[in-house]
Amino acid sequence: MDIEEINKKVEQVDGLGGMTVNERLYESGLMEIYDNAMKNDKELAKSILQALKVDNPSITEILK
């Protein structure tokens, strides 16, 4: 999945700001892709979190 496809999924979700990271992943349908990326492709995982508007300090902590 490329960043364009990720962004399309994210655009379909209303109210991202009031959701936890897990809720954002679930509502966008990116949970499974993200889980695989965390194991195999941290840059993709980072891109997903950025698309979901997770703040940079949180991204840094999550990707440790």
Image (tube, grey):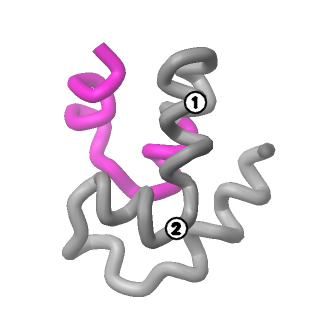
The structure residue drawn at horizontal position 30% and vertical position 54%, both measured from the top left corner, is 22
**Which disc is residue 36 wearing?**
1
25 lies left or right of 33: left
Report if the CB atoms under discs 2 and 1 are less than 8 Å apart: no
Q: Residues within 10 Å of mark 1 (few under 14, many from 20)?
A: few
Q: In the rendered view, tell whether residue 27 sits above or below residue 22.
A: below
Q: Main secondary structure of the magenta part?
A: helix
In the image, farthest residue toward the bottom: 14
Q: In the rendered view, tell whether residue 64 sits above or below residue 27.
A: above
> Which element carries disc 1, helix, strand or loop?
helix
Pinpoint residue 48: horizontal percent, then vertical percent: 54, 45
Question: Mark 2 or mark 1: which is in front?
Answer: 1
- Mark pair 2, 1: CA separation: 15 Å
The structure residue drawn at horizontal position 61% and vertical position 16%, both measured from the top left corner, is 40
The quarter in which the C terminus is drawn is top left
Q: In terms of image quadrants, where is residue 24?
A: bottom left
The numbered mark, 2 or 1, whose residue comes first in the sequence reads 2
Q: Residues within 10 Å of mark 2 (few under 14, many from 20)?
A: many
Pinpoint residue 2: horizontal percent, then vertical percent: 79, 44
32 lies left or right of 6: left
Q: In terms of image quadrants, where is residue 60?
A: top left
Q: Amino acid at mark 1?
A: Asn
Which span of residues is magenta-colored?
47-64
**Which disc is residue 17 wearing?**
none
Q: In the rendered view, tell whether residue 54 sits above or below residue 7.
A: above
Pinpoint residue 12: horizontal percent, then vertical percent: 58, 81
> Which element carries disc 2, helix, strand or loop?
helix
The quarter in which the N terminus is drawn is top right
Residue that mark 2 sits on? 28
Q: In the rendered view, tell whether residue 2 sits above or below residue 61.
A: below
The structure residue drawn at horizontal position 33% and vertical position 50%, both measured from the top left corner, is 54
Q: In terms of image quadrants, where is residue 9?
A: bottom right
